[in-house]
Image (cartoon, grey):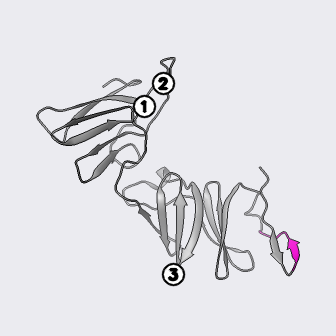
Amino acid sequence: NEDTLYVYNNSNWSKPSLGSYYNNSDIKDINVSSSELLVCLFGKVWVLSSDYSLTFEANKYSISGIPDWATPARPMEIIEKNGDYWVADSVFGLIRFKGIDLSERIIPNGPDHADVWEMKAKFGKLWVATGGYTDANNNVFSNKGVYSYDGALWTNYNDIITPGWTPFYDIITVAPDPADVNKAYFGSYSNGA
């Protein structure tokens, strides 16, 4: 894709000089804030000054408890409010940049994904397996983990947010422990129990 930014100024269209950092990447969204141009591209966000020089770029997020390598940016929109940049990310939800180095993930409590293959409840606690397989009984290689709901809070377990979690693909079955409300067993279509 050869996306290009154009500027309309005083009835004229022009292509701003963006320097060597711009290589016609896929533009997802643009927005304006006072004297800045806010740009979402595939895998990063930019803040450009009024002369189109790059003043801020983020291609990953610093989220507490998640290693930087596991937080590649997938921004869909960016806005600015009171000096903070707010990014709607297709993987990580709402990200708030307070300054150029500090980011914060803001998400309502809930499951990380809408995927459900199997659900079981015991002692008032719901457990959800997110995997699956195709009609031909082949793996779908879903690695979205599992989640539980205790009537008030959702807890998500997966390789990105759970320290020490070994990624299992296609978790298709769940068995709550009959003696321990906080314990469940899961079976994977690709890796076993």
Q: Are marks 3 and 2 in contact (CB under 8 Å)?
A: no
- Report the quarter where the C terminus lies: top left
Using the image, determine if residue 133 lies above or below residue 164: above
User: In percent of the image, x 48 and y 64: which residue is there?
Assistant: 95
SS assignment at label 1 = loop
> How many numbered marks, from 0 up?
3
Earlier in the chain: of badge 1 and badge 2, it is 2
Q: Nearer the viewer, residue 114 or 56?
A: 114
Q: Nearer the viewer, residue 124 or 40?
A: 124
Residue 16, magenta (yes or no) = yes
Image side of residue 170 versus residue 81, left or right:
left
Report how far apart the C-alphas of labels 1 and 2 lie in the structure.
8 Å
Residue lying at the far left in this picture: please name it. 179
Earlier in the chain: of badge 3 and badge 2, it is 3
Q: Position of residue 119 (x, y in %)?
A: 31, 34
Instruction: Residue under label 3, please give it.
Output: 82
Residue lying at the far right in this picture: please name it. 12
Instruction: Residue under label 1, please give it.
Output: 169
Instruction: Residue under label 2, please give it.
Output: 139
Earlier in the chain: of badge 1 and badge 3, it is 3
Report how far apart the C-alphas of labels 1 and 3 lie in the structure.
42 Å
Q: Position of residue 173 (x, y in %)?
A: 32, 28
User: In percent of the image, x 41 and y 32: which residue is there?
Assistant: 131
Image side of residue 156 versus residue 70, left or right:
left
Q: Are marks 1 and 2 in contact (CB under 8 Å)?
A: yes
Q: Which residues are magenta?
A: 11-18
Inspect the image, locate mark 2, and give the three-letter code of the amino acid beneath it.
Answer: Asn
Inspect the image, locate mark 1, and give the three-letter code of the amino acid beneath it.
Answer: Tyr
